[in-house]
Image: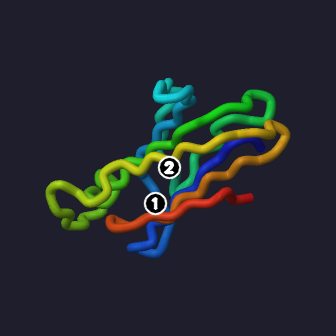
Amino acid sequence: MGLSTHVLDTMHGGPAAGMAVALYTTQGEQATLVKRFTLNADGRSDGPLYDNASLRVGTYRLTFDVAAYFKARGVQLPEPNFLDKVSLDFGVAHTDQHYHVPLLVSPWSYSTYRGS
């Protein structure tokens, strides 16, 4: 399955449908945009971000537009926002394995892990 992501909105107790996300490859401080996409009704990308044939050993970044998502949901956020964009940098060591990067997020906190 390659690389996938899923975002759960812990403030509202459901998927973060409509959240904007960007995927980058990284090399040191250099980041190269691979694609931008919007999460579907299940809070997931439509299909894998990379399949196993396209995924390469290396480092990646997923950037989630958290503040814009919560503002669009009508949440009153302070200026500046506590969380604006959440960026997760992670490594892929085995391209024959599935790398699932979930994000659980509210306007005030987030957590992630390597999912299955």
Question: Which corner quadrant holds the C terminus?
Answer: bottom right
The x, y position of residue 30, in whole percent, is 47, 25
Question: Which corner quadrant holds the N terminus?
Answer: top right
Residue at image position (49%, 70%) is 14
Side (left or right) of 107 relative to 52? left
Residue nearest the viewer, comparing 108 with 7: 108
Amino acid on which disc 1 is placed: Ala
Look at mark 2 in the image and give the residue it sits on. Answer: 39
Pointer 1 or 2: first along the chain? 1
Residue 42 visible in the displayed image:
no
Q: Are marks 1 and 2 in contact (CB under 8 Å)?
A: yes
Residue at image position (74%, 41%) is 2
Please tell me whether residue 17 is drawn above or below residue 95 in the rendered image: below
Amino acid on which disc 2 is placed: Leu
Q: Residue at the far right: name it.
A: 96
Callout 1: helix, strand or loop?
Answer: loop
Side (left or right) of 56 relative to 78? right
Residue at image position (48%, 39%) is 37
Labelled disc at residue 58: none
Side (left or right) of 82 relative to 54? left
Q: How many marks?
A: 2
Real-space CA distance between mark 1 and mark 2, rounded to the nearest whole angstrom: 7 Å
The x, y position of residue 27, in whole percent, is 56, 26
Residue nearest the viewer, comparing 89 with 97: 89
- How crowded is the residue under tag 2: few (<14 C-alpha within 10 Å), some, or many (20+)? many
Callout 2: helix, strand or loop?
Answer: loop
Look at mark 1 in the image and give the residue it sits on. Answer: 16
Q: Residue at the far front: name it.
A: 28
- How crowded is the residue under tag 1: few (<14 C-alpha within 10 Å), some, or many (20+)? many
